[in-house]
Image (spheres, rainbow, N blue to C red):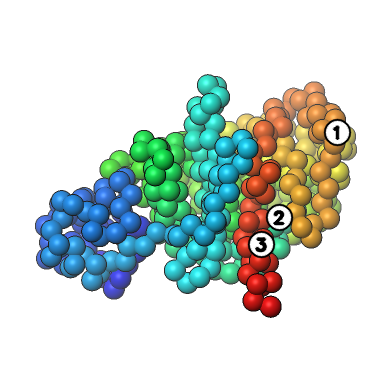
Amino acid sequence: MSGDHMDVCGLSEAELTAVCLETGLPAYRGRQVFEWVQRLGAADWADMKNISRADREKLAGRLTLRLPAPERVRVSRDGTRKFLFRLADGETIESVLMDYSGDRSRDRVTLCLSAQVGCAVGCRFCATGRMGFRRDLSAGEITGQLLAVTAYMRRADADFRATNLVFMGMGEPFYNMESFLRAARILNEERGQNIGARRMTVSTAGVVPGILRLAEAAPQMGLAVSLHAGTDDLRDTLVPLNRKYPLAVLTDACREYARRTGRRLTFEIALTRESATEAQARALAALLRGMPAHINLIPVNPVAGSTAERPTAARAAAFRRALTKRGLTATIRAEKGVDIEAACGQLRQEFNDFQRNKNS
């Protein structure tokens, strides 16, 4: 392994061991550094008490250790926390922590991670898409979100641990496939966070090559597809990517994913006044017939500048009934963090607006 000042947060235990050997240090130092960073959350070389100062200095000459810095943290009435992190180059990203541990049937603490700064897909109802694409995140910046959230939460709770990960934050993970997969593998390592692949889910707007690659590279990981409509004409207006991968092509890939992995897919429908209709329910039932699938119905969050309107609660419930009577499994997802604008990109957009106004 070669290279100067690699991000320690983006290296596996084996890679850190290789760096230590190249640096003239014993192999076990790699294990120690990996555990300090990935399991114990060390944010500074000085935190690594069982590594000599001389060895820490040698490692600091090869490796960069810097977690994303919390710029803002908002806490919802329901306990959801939204983090705005500043990266080394000044860009900002978001992560959302959702605590379901009070619900015995859903005893988990889920962290939503970003894969990019901004997004190129441009879904009509998404605050991130309105920013455009800035850049991909490195594997270290993806894992660093979890490490930074863990460090923050452990100030009050020394035993805090995220149990589940969803790669559903800012950006399209399948447009940053290698970094996303590397981060997932690192977070799965036994001496690190040790989060099982079955406790990880990745969401895509419908990047067909990525769906097929995931089936080969990480078949145990959950897949959620942002479908949002059952007809091409409506989906074209909601998800511009549909013009490249229309519904027939997308659902063929989903069926192939299910065949290769034996896993059930999740399809997400952002409910708008346009999509929550009887006609769309019929189209979805025809589109997904026979596929092992669960449908998450998500009333759209209010986003500045978006024309997408959420349906009434009664209409959302009627839409769910229209799906279930046609044999589909569907639930209206419990909303978390609406009062803190927990939808992707909203806090970053607000922060950027504040900075512009302050400097004008």
State the residue at coordinates (23%, 59%): 46
* Mark closest to the chain's N terminus, 1 or 3: 1
Whole-percent x and y of residue 97? 53, 43
Between discs 1 and 2, the one toward the N terminus: 2
Q: Amino acid at mark 2?
A: Cys
If you read the primary sequence from the N terminus, does the residue marked by circle 3 or circle 2 appear first? 2
Task: Answer above or below: position of 126 versus 273.
Answer: below
Q: Which residue is mark 1?
A: 315
Q: Is residue 33 above or below residue 224?
A: below
Q: Point out the image quarter for the C terminus.
A: bottom right
- Give the distance between the C-alpha atoms of the residues marked 1 and 3, in whole angstroms: 30 Å
Classify 291 as above or below 37: above
Query: What is the quadrant of the N terminus in the image?
Result: bottom left
**Left or right of residue 63, residue 84 in this image:** right
Q: Marks 3 and 2: which is nearer the front?
A: 3
Q: CA distance from mark 1 to mark 2?
A: 22 Å
- Residue of label 2: 126
Left or right of 74 in this view: 196: left
Dot 2, crowdedness within 10 Å: few (<14), some or many (≥20)? many
- Residue placed at 36% from the left, 50% from the top? 186
Secondary element under disc 2, as helix, strand or loop, is loop
Q: Are marks 1 and 3 in contact (CB under 8 Å)?
A: no
Q: Which residue is mark 3?
A: 349
Q: Nearer the viewer, residue 64 or 151?
A: 151
Tell me residue 137's x, y (percent): 49, 63
Tag 1 secondary structure: helix
As drawn, 200 above or below 183: above
Nearer the observer, 123 or 146? 146
Residue 146 in view of the camera: no
What residue type is disc 1 on? Answer: Arg
* Residue 35 in the image, given as x and y percentages of width and height: 26, 48
